[in-house]
């Protein structure tokens, strides 16, 4: 075969013979790897160093990019073990909050400044824990959802919008490690390197799409974000759905609570004390002594042996419980039952819900955003289970809007979905 650059015909083929077109296309070159523009800064771990950082950040301009690293999967707590900040004119600062007396000077230095975060609901609780609370913010992940990007991870958005690749190899690291390795610090600094630039691009896109006001309301709503307090959190134990009988459920609850107390005291993630599979196995077998317990599937680690008396005591307490003290099969809740039961229990509510869900999917497609960002699914379930009593269209629309607002829907959401939900209610009941 002739060389790719050789345009001469092959031997025996006429000069003017038509050649088949080469339809192969070269793969586009990979996006350049994002690098630190100012080099790796040192870690601020003294009050004097924090004062220097605060002076630089307070004297800078524009919004501040903020990120926090936790030790999820290693520690019980959700505390921040490293805080990264970058602001135009101040560069990047890496703050270790563990050894500092207070972060109050940092809060003061950032007062009135817009914070740029990615997935703010992940970082706001741990930042609030150390005294850092924004007065305004811009969430690049949420902006990506409102703009209809199919993938909204930071690295994906940076590559899609800014054309640069990010390193993500240390995202699951144990950030409680001290001293922090240099490659980890470089990774952490890169997380805020282009957040300001990304925010500016996305703000322009939101304006062009007519969604800037939606984003403003969403960001304002995030300022009061609090993590949901899980009721009966033990029911989320992996495999607990396989247990049969209330006493087995009681055993799973008792073992989960014992493990949770130990994990909280040691500040270790519960799964490192005892895996969920061991809890389910013991709740099924109900061993009566240490020897039987340690021969149960899953009880083979240091935590299983070290705290064996706590596990045995928990199981004994369950054996001594009356039937009334044991947990029910179904979790208690203040909301409506699961929609899969509505067709049999409340057929009209079932028709309302199915019509409303279809309307929400259509609206989300028209406006290019995930349906869960159009309206929180729980709000839809609650409204369709117990809608306002009036059926006069104008009154119903006002009542639906009021009810959604009471649940927590933002004005842009209530305004966008009310007409469709009124139609679903009236249509399903005709």
Image (cartoon, rainbow, N blue to C red):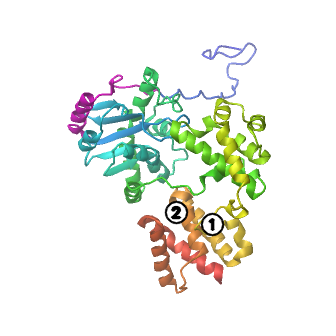
Q: Comparing marks 1 and 2, which lies closer to the viewer?
A: 2
Q: Which residues are magenta?
A: 32-61
In-front residue for pair 43/261: 261
- Point out residue 421 in the picture as x, y percentages from the top left corner: 55, 73
**In which quadrant is the N terminus drawn?**
top right
Location of the C terminus by quadrant is bottom right
Q: Position of residue 238 (x, y in %)?
A: 68, 46
Which secondary structure lies at badge 2? Answer: loop
Q: Mark 1 sits on what residue?
A: 358
Q: Residue at x 63, y 64 (%)?
A: 332
User: Closer to the N terminus: mark 1 or mark 2?
Assistant: 1
Taking 403 as reference, is 192 left or right? left
Q: Which residue is mark 2?
A: 375
Against 263, residue 33 (above or below) is: above
Horizontal placement of 252 versus 425: left or right? right
Q: Within the magenta stretch, is there residue 154?
A: no
Q: Which mark is residue 159?
A: none
Inter-mark Cα distance, 1 to 2: 13 Å
At horizontal 52% and vertical 41% (from top left) the residue drawn is: 264
């Amino acid at each position: 075969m002739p060389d790719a650059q050789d345009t001469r015909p092959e031997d025996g083929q006429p000069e003017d013979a038509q050649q088949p077109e080469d339809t192969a296309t070269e793969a586009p070159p990979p996006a350049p790897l994002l690098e630190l523009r100012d080099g790796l800064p040192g870690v601020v771990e003294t009050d004097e160093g924090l004062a220097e950082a605060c002076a630089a950040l307070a004297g800078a301009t524009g919004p501040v990019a903020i990120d926090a690293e936790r030790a999820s999967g290693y520690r019980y707590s959700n505390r921040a073990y490293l805080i990264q900040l970058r602001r135009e004119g101040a560069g990047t600062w890496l703050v270790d909050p563990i050894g500092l007396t207070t972060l109050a000077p940092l809060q003061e230095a950032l007062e009135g400044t817009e914070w740029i975060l990615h997935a703010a609901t992940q970082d706001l609780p741990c930042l609030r824990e150390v005294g850092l609370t924004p007065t305004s913010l811009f969430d690049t992940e949420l902006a990506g959802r409102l703009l209809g990007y199919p993938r909204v991870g930071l690295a994906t958005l940076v590559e899609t919008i800014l054309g640069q690749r990010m390193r993500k190899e240390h995202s699951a690291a144990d950030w409680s490690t001290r001293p922090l390795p240099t490659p980890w610090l470089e990774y952490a600094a890169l997380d805020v390197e282009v957040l300001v630039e990304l925010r500016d691009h996305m703000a322009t896109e939101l304006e062009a799409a007519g969604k800037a006001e939606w984003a403003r309301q969403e960001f304002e709503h995030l300022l009061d974000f609090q993590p949901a307090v899980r009721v009966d959190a033990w029911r989320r134990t992996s495999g607990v759905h396989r247990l049969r009988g209330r006493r087995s459920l009681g055993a799973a609850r008792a073992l989960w609570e014992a493990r949770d107390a130990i994990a909280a005291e040691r500040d270790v993630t519960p799964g490192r004390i005892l895996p969920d599979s061991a809890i389910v196995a013991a709740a099924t077998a109900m061993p009566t002594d240490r020897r039987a317990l340690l021969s149960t599937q899953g009880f083979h680690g240091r935590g299983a042996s070290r705290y064996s008396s706590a596990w045995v005591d928990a199981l004994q307490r369950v054996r001594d419980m009356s039937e009334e003290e044991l947990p029910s099969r179904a979790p208690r809740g203040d909301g409506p039952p699961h929609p899969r039961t509505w067709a049999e229990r409340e057929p009209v509510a079932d028709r309302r819900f199915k019509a409303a869900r279809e309307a929400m999917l259509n609206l989300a497609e028209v406006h290019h955003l995930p349906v869960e960002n159009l309206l929180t699914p729980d709000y839809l379930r609650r409204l369709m289970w117990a809608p306002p009593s009036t059926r006069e269209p104008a009154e119903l629309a006002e009542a639906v809007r009021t009810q959604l607002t009471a649940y927590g829907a933002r004005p842009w959401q209530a305004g966008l979905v009310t007409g469709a939900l009124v139609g679903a209610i009236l249509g399903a009941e005709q």
